Amino acid sequence: MSDTKTPIRTFLLEHPRLTGALLTTALVVSQVGTVAAGNGGATT
């Protein structure tokens, strides 16, 4: 991997709380998907 910093990487390094919020959101979304799949995808 190169050492060049992309604008996204630079932004996330400057905003660590936002990075944590994004990771938490990704975790919650993945868990919701797992629950929906285990439930047969029923939403009622």
Image: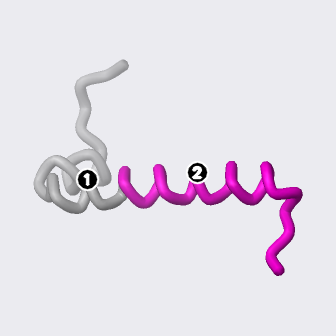
Residue 32 falls within the magenta-colored stretch: yes
Of residues 31 and 44, the one drawn nearer to the viewer in this rendering: 44
Residue at image position (58%, 51%) is 30
Disc 2 residue crowd, few under 14, some 14–19, many 20+, Cα 10 Å: few
Under circle 2, the secondary element is helix
**Residue matched to label 2:** 30
* x 30%, y 44%: residue: 6
Chain part drawn in magenta: 23-44
Q: Amino acid at mark 2?
A: Ser
Specify whether 26 is left or right of 32: left
The x and y percentages for residue 4 are 25, 32
Q: Amino acid at mark 1?
A: Gly
Query: Which comes sooner in the sequence, label 2 or label 1?
Result: 1
Residue wearing tag 1: 20
Instruction: Tell me: residue 15, above or below residue 5.
Output: below
Q: Dot 1, crowdedness within 10 Å: few (<14), some or many (≥20)? A: few
Secondary structure beneath dot 1 equals helix
**Membership of 5 in magenta stretch:** no
Q: CA distance from mark 2 to mark 1?
A: 15 Å
